[in-house]
Structure formats: C-alpha cells, structure tokens
Image (spheres, rainbow, N blue to C red):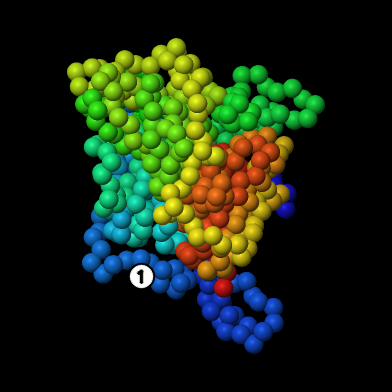
Amino acid sequence: MTPAEHPPFPNRRMSRRGFLVLGTGTAAAVGLSACSSGGGTPVQAKVGPTSPLVARGEQARRAANAAVTTADLTATVGEVDLGGVPVKTWTYGGALPGKEIRLKRGEVLKANLGNRLPQPTSIHWHGLALRNDMDGVPDVTQQAVAANADFTYEFTVPDAGTYWFHPHVGVQLDRGLYAPLIVEDPADGKDYDDELVIVLDDWIDGTGTDPDAVLDNLKKNGMAMGHSMPGMSEMPGMPKSDVLGGDAGDVIYPHMLANGRLATAPHSFDGKPGQRIRLRLINAGGDTVFRVGIPGVPMRITHTDGFPATTPNPAETVLIGMGERVDAVISLPDKGVPVIAIAEGKNAYAQILLHSGGSKSATANDTAVAALKARQVHGLADFQATPEVSLPAKNPDVVHDMVLAGPGAKYDWTINGKPFNPNDGLPIRQGQRVRLRFVNDSDMYHPMHLHGHTFQVRGQNNLGARKDTAIVLPRTTVEVDFDANNPGQWLTHCHNVYHGEAGMMSVVSYVE
Ligand SMILES: [Cu+2]
C-alpha cells in the first residue's frame, strides 16, 4: 500500500469489526501462551486494552477507599473571545482553556465526555500512566466516541504533576479542545506560596480557516511548504530557529495565546513582593515551541513533564515543545513583570502579567522580547531528574529504533519508513527495561511523546530528565529508557499535531 492509499487515521472509517480484532487478539493470547509452554516459536500475541492484565494493573493502583473526582466535559462548538477577537471554535464547555481538573495522587478521576461536535472525538490524558483502555486513542485503545454520543473515562491517577488533556482524533487538538490536569502531591507547597497554571497555544481556528483545512493544504503543497530539499531553495517567510536546528514550524499562525488570551489583552495575576510562585507551564500548541522567561527573574526548575527535576543553574528562559510541561518556582520582585512566551522562530509571543503589590506589570513589547531572546535558554540537555525519580541502572532488555523521516511528496511523515498503522507495533514485554532511540533523519525537530509511561532521557550519569515528551532536534538521536510496567498498546508519536496526523505515529505494543 502506498502512503497515499493508506489513510493516517483509518479509525474514522473503523468498523465495529475493526475493534473486535483487538479483543479477539487478546482472547487468543491467553490460549496461545498456554500452547507455547512446550517450547517452539513464541507467539507475539498483543496485550490489548481489554486484557485482564490491564484491569489487574488498575486494581493494584487503586486503594479501596480512593476518593473519586467527577468532571463533566462537553465537547462543544461555540464562540470564544481571545481578547477583542471573537472566534468560532471547539472547546470543552465553552471555556478556553477548558476548566482545570485538579485532584490528588492516588485518587480516581471519573470524566463524563459528551461529544457535541460534528465529528467523532476522544480524550487522551497526556502524561499519565493510566489504565490502557482509558488512554483515549481510537483504533488502539477504544473506538472513537461518535458525534452526539457519550463516554465515561474512569481511572486512578498514579503520579503527581502537571498534566493536561486533549482529543486524539485528527487535528482537533489544534482547535480549543484542551485543559490542564493537575495532580497534587501531599508534599506540594513546601517551597512555594501560590501557583499559576499557564497554558500556551498557537491559534488559527475560526480565523477564516481551521486545522482540517490547514492539514489539507499541507498535504496538497507537500514539501513545498518551506521544507528544505537538496538543490532547492527554501520558501521565504517560513519559521526558522537556531535553537531548534532550522525549521521552526510548518504553520503560520495569526495568534499566540496564554490561557486563551492574546498578548494585547493578557490575563494577569496579583501577587506580593517576595512571594514564591510555582509556575506550571503547559504547551498545548499544534506546531509551535515556546521559549518562556520573565525579564530579570530567574526560574528555579522543579519538574519536567510532572516529575521532579533540576538544572545546574536557575533558568533565564526555558524551551517548551508541544506536549511538554515545565514547572518552575520564581520569587516575585517588588515590581510587576510579564511572563513572556516567545513563539520560537515565529516572530510572535503571548504573555501573562504578574502584578506585585501595588506595582502593575507593563505589557511586554518588542524590545523586551528581543532582550529576553538574547538570554540563555535551557532545554532538554540541561534538565536532570532528581535521584528519587531516576530509574535504577540496568541494561536494556530490548532496544527499538524509531527513525523519524519526512516530509514526503504528500507531506508524509514516517517512523521507520512507514506511516502509522495501528496494527503494527514495537513489541515489548511486561517487566522489561526498554530503550527507545528516536533517530531524527529529517531536517525538522520532533517533540516525541510516549503514552502511558514517563521515560528517562539518557543523560549524564543517567540522570537525564524524566519526561513523556522530548524534543529530538534535526539529525540527532535521543535515547530514552523506561520500565515496562503498564501493560497495553501505547501510542508513541510526534506531538506536532500535523506530523502525527500525517503518519508520524507508532505503537509500543506489550505482547504476551
Ligand atoms: Cu514531528
């Protein structure tokens, strides 16, 4: 099958029969593993989302008296105000970002999704090591939730940290369907006084076009959209960034948002001089890395993708790829200051104003942005996991290379030469130490995300950051390790929503 014939998301046309294949595979696995006990070729039957192993894992996570937090999430079409700019878009409950969900580690989230969109949808709980059948990936862990249908997600949240949720159907994520999910730890609040969640986003929906049209356009124009090709000059005006090793994006967005607002109409936060604020920074963008900083205020990095981390020095600015989160504690100066989120390579920014005591923050301007851009930037190589959350040293039992390539003539992005096929997978087994090697064979960066696990980036002294999403720069390789302790079928993909939808996805597949 050529890539053109192979739809990146066959799930839109997926039949009930398609889903039953997974179920049958799981049932067959039980019988087959019994048959192969006498030796012979091991049969690689998949541990599917309906496997008893998945239910058993959830049982082990859940305390008998675990508190349940309920959230009603209506995916709906409507108008939101970006700050003097009204746009028609898709949101959870009409809010942008959607209303934050907050609960404590070990508690149970019960989220009732009502799909009032004109398309099927799903919810993926980004970063959480949850039960596989609640991971929200059509074709892999569940059937998409049809228009006007409902679905209840229910699972235990095992780890504290800054997470978020979004659909896993098409490019719906690049509309307004996203919200923070904050999991508190009993120890939280010891080294800060207050907190501020900031969700960053690149915005195009309802501005005369929409993400589906953007993807169609990218496919139509294929490689012409600013990607370099040997012997050809590049399209002028496309985003460029040294920090990202060249191409900074495929989409020219008219707006950048912080907590749903334009830089010209920013939200503000009222604090006091000396107050310690924990910033929970989330990049919900589709095709934009943000470089975040506060002029003159160093940030003490405390978490990457929810897990405790440090940097050798406080950060002046920090790079946050799509899907990534960074937590940092700052001390409010006695003068108001803006948190500036520069859209890397895109000549635009978003902001949140931090007022301090009686001092109102001025809004950022191009001079302040240029000055901030000249400061040191912290990224993946600077983050270290704390010893408590570092994986014990162990040689990998299995190593999988994931060669990232594209774009092809029709804007195809591939892993190991193939576009996404939900029935293919990189086999692993329960209990293994797994190493993934993201080998970027393209001229663009890719924020690579793994569902259901928080890997550890292989860094100095094996203390690389614990993360679930990591930027892989052009022509480089990033190696990550994780322990296979959450059975199921787990998507791993580029969190550039257009790359993912154009094929850059694969499945890390537990087999019997
Ligand atoms: Cu990508």
User: Looking at the rendering, which quadrant does residue 111 occupy?
Assistant: bottom left
Quadrant showing the C terminus = bottom right
Q: Residue at x 43, y 45 (%)?
A: 309
Whether residue 213 is visible, yes or no, is: no
Q: Is residue 442 left or right of residue 76?
A: right
The correct choice, above or below, for 424 with respect to 273 in the image is below
Q: Nearer the viewer, residue 313 or 173?
A: 313
Q: Residue most toward the bottom?
A: 38
Give the image location of residue 170, x and y in percent: 52, 44
Q: Residue at x 60, y 57 (%)?
A: 435
Give the image location of residue 302, x and y in percent: 38, 41
**Amino acid carrying mark 1 in the image:** Gln
Give the image location of residue 400, x and y in percent: 64, 57
Q: Nearer the viewer, residue 81 or 461?
A: 461
Q: Nearer the viewer, residue 466 or 45?
A: 466
Q: Residue most toward the left?
A: 358
User: Looking at the rendering, which quadrant does residue 193 occupy?
Assistant: top left
Q: Answer few, some or many: residues within 10 Å of disc 1's Cα (few below 14, many 20 plus, some between 14 and 19).
A: some
Q: Is residue 408 left or right of residue 248?
A: right
The correct choice, above or below, for 173 with respect to 452 in the image is above
Q: Nearer the viewer, residue 451 or 372?
A: 372
Q: Residue at x 53, y 72 (%)?
A: 26
Q: Is residue 217 left or right of residue 56?
A: right
- The residue that label 1 is drawn on is 59
Label 1 lies in ligand 1 vicinity (Cβ under 8 Å): no
